């Protein structure tokens, strides 16, 4: 089933995925993970950039790092990971992007707020 059939929209079109250093073969995997974290119904428009790179110095531990600088609606979402192997930054970015976008998407929910202050702060008495 394609996005046309189930009503999903392509939110990752405005998110650029880049890789630096010696990254070969896992850029498609990274794109899949970013798309899985950001393609969900109810999410405001998403734009920005996701970068993964390997350190060129051999003594850097962990050598792989990833960073996402994206905007979900008007809210900035910045996520960073540092991992030991090539696929771990993609997995870490996926997990952290999913939870960060979830927080941003529900930050404006007013379901837990009351219309008036509580009685001990001068609100209506019951």
Image (tube, rainbow, N blue to C red):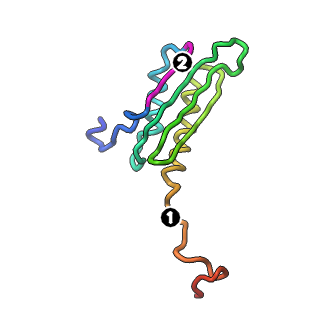
Q: Which image quarter holds the N terminus?
A: top left
Boundaries of the magenta span: 16-22
Residue 17 on the magenta span: yes
| Residue at 48% over, 31% down | 49
| Residue at 30% over, 44% down | 7
Say which residue label 1 marks.
110
Residue 57, placed above or below residue 40: above
Frontmost residue, 7 versus 120: 120
Horizontal side of residue 56 vs 107, given as left or right: right
Horizontal side of residue 1 vs 76, given as left or right: left
Element carrying mark 1: loop
Frontmost residue, 3 versus 54: 54
Residue 5 on the magenta span: no
Frontmost residue, 78 versus 38: 78
Residue 126, given in percent of the width and then of the height, sits at 58, 88
Q: CA distance from mark 2 to mark 1?
A: 42 Å
Which is more foreground, mark 2 or mark 1? 2
Residue 17, placed above or below residue 7: above
Residue 111, given in percent of the width and then of the height, sits at 50, 65
The numbered disc on residue 20 is 2
Q: Residues within 10 Å of mark 2 (few under 14, many from 20)?
A: few
Q: Quadrant of residue 63?
A: top right
| Residue at 48% over, 38% down | 37
Dominant SS type (magenta): strand
């Amino acid at each position: 089933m394609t996005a046309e059939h189930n009503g999903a929209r392509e939110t990752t079109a405005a998110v650029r995925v880049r890789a630096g250093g010696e990254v070969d073969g896992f850029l498609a995997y990274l794109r899949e993970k970013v798309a899985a974290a950001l393609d969900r119904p109810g999410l405001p428009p998403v734009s920005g950039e996701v970068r993964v790179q390997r350190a060129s110095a051999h003594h850097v531990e962990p050598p792989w790092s990833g960073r996402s600088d994206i905007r979900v609606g008007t809210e900035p979402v910045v996520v960073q990971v540092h991992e030991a192997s090539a696929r771990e930054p993609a997995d870490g970015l996926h997990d952290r992007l999913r939870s960060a976008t979830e927080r941003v998407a529900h930050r404006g929910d007013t379901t837990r707020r009351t219309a008036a202050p509580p009685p001990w702060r001068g609100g209506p008495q019951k």
